Amino acid sequence: MEKTLVIIKPCALQRALTGEVIKRFEQKGLRLAGIKMMQLDDRILREHYAHLAERPFFQRIKDSMMITPVIVTCWEGKDAVKVVRAMTGSTNGRDAVPGTIRGDFSLSVQENIIHTSDSVETAAVELARFFSDDEIFAYNYQSLPFLYANDEI
Ligand code: UDP
Ligand code: MG
């Protein structure tokens, strides 16, 4: 099934929202396939945020992502990329709809709680960037028959 990346940003760790973020994806029914704490550095952030390299705030974003370790997670489910992105909300927390993670916990465009992959193609590239193959786990998820109809999976 489809997998996607969620990075719990330093602002969320500082605000003790790690459990809340994980709880939301668990409650939705997504399967946690990988999780670890890691300290990001300039090299990986340059790669990860390459689409913003020419923006004047590039250094500010990188600094914000390195201020503490982050928690990187991999979630699996049917249409997981689309589902997680919808639960994330708009980039700017002030515009994000209440009920989304950013809409409920952020007032900022930068300090917006989580990073989530924006397409199936990006998710594959980003998961490979942050996880090695042996850090992504396949295991029997007993809830599946209660999460989906048998013709959905
Ligand atoms: N960002 C920012 N100012 C901007 C655009 C982006 O500080 O004008 C930061 C913000 O933390 C965002 C990240 O850069 O989450 C990546 O930007 P992107 O456009 O990919 O937004 P996202 O996919 O996170 O919604
Ligand atoms: Mg993005």
Image (cartoon, helix red, strand yellow):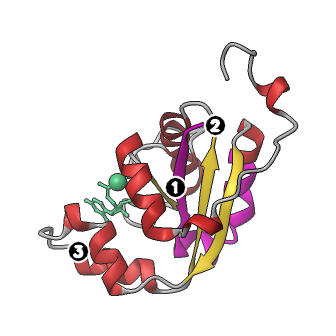
Within-10-Å neighbours for mark 3: few <14, some 14–19, many 20+: some
Q: Which residues are magenta?
A: 1-25
Q: Nearer the viewer, residue 138 or 88?
A: 138
Mark 3 within 8 Å of ligand 1, using the beta carbon = no
Residue lying at 52% horizontally and 49% vertically, measured from the top left: 4
> Which secondary structure lies at badge 1?
strand
Ligand 2 quadrant assignment: bottom left
On residue 5, which mark appears? 1
Residue lying at 40% horizontally and 86% vertically, measured from the top left: 41
Q: Position of residue 91 (x, y in %)?
A: 38, 51
Q: Residue furthest left?
A: 54
Within-10-Å neighbours for mark 2: few <14, some 14–19, many 20+: many
Screen quadrant of the C terminus = top right
Residue lying at 60% horizontally and 56% vertically, measured from the top left: 74
Residues at marks 1 and 2 touching, judged by CB atoms closer than 8 Å: no
Mark 2 within 8 Å of ligand 1, using the beta carbon = no
Query: Could you tell me how far apart the alpha carbons at marks 3 and 2 are, in whole angstroms?
Result: 32 Å
Q: Position of residue 131 (x, y in %)?
A: 53, 68
Question: Would residue 27 be found to the left or right of residue 47 on screen?
Answer: right
Total tally of numbered discs in the picture? 3
Mark toward the start of the polypeptide (3 vs 2): 3
Query: Could you tell me how far apart the alpha carbons at marks 1 and 2 are, in whole angstroms?
Result: 12 Å
Q: Nearer the viewer, mark 3 or mark 2?
A: 2
Q: Position of residue 123 (x, y in %)?
A: 43, 50
Q: Amino acid at mark 2?
A: Gly
> Which secondary structure lies at badge 3?
helix
Q: Amino acid at mark 3?
A: Phe
Q: Which residue is label 2 attached to?
A: 77
Q: Amino acid at mark 1?
A: Leu
Question: Would residue 111 be found to the left or right of residue 13 on screen?
Answer: left
